[in-house]
Image (cartoon, rainbow, N blue to C red):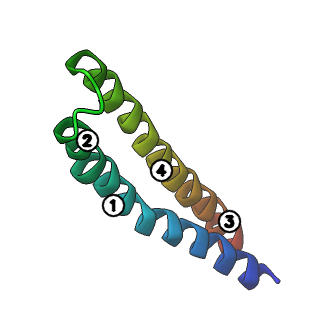
Amino acid sequence: MLTAGLASFGSAALLHLVTLPVEWDASFRRALPLLASGQYLSAKDQRGARQILTAAAFTYVAGSLASLLNLWRWLRWFRR
């Protein structure tokens, strides 16, 4: 049962790490240029859009770190 729990936490950590570059690419290589070229936002609002997309990307960073820390905690307990 412990091994299944470790596998579960490990797969969650792996999923977050795989999703992180995809989210980063979607926010900064796709969304921002699309918003700028399509003139969907004024120049004043583009700065705010960048801040919001940065915050959204960092939620994935935080999720990845939380998953890794949780996995590390379980691995430490498993070694005892």
Q: Marks 3 and 2, how far apart in space?
A: 39 Å
- In this rendered view, identify the residue nearer to me: 41 or 67: 41
> Where does label 4 land, which residue?
60
Return the x and y of residue 48 as percentages of the image width and height: 34, 22
- In this rendered view, identify the residue nearer to me: 6 or 60: 60
Q: Amino acid at mark 4?
A: Tyr
> Where does label 3 land, which residue?
74
Return the x and y of residue 44 as percentages of the image width and height: 25, 15
Which numbered disc, 3 or 2, marks the residue closer to the eye? 2
Rendered image: mark on residue 32: 2
Q: Marks 3 and 4, how far apart in space?
A: 21 Å
Query: Crowdedness of circle 3 by 10 Å Cα count: few (<14), some, many (20+)?
Result: some
Where on the picture, by quarter, is residue 12?
Answer: bottom right
In the displayed structure, would residue 45 be above or below residue 5? above
Query: Crowdedness of circle 1 by 10 Å Cα count: few (<14), some, many (20+)?
Result: some
Question: Is there CB contact under 8 Å for labels 3 and 4?
Answer: no
Q: Amino acid at mark 1?
A: Pro
Q: Marks 1 and 3, how far apart in space?
A: 26 Å
Q: Amino acid at mark 2?
A: Leu
Rendered image: mark on residue 21: 1
Which numbered disc, 2 or 4, marks the residue closer to the eye? 2
Q: Marks 1 and 4, how far apart in space?
A: 9 Å
Sequence-first tag of 1 and 4: 1
Return the x and y of residue 22 as percentages of the image width and height: 36, 62
Q: Marks 1 and 2, how far apart in space?
A: 16 Å
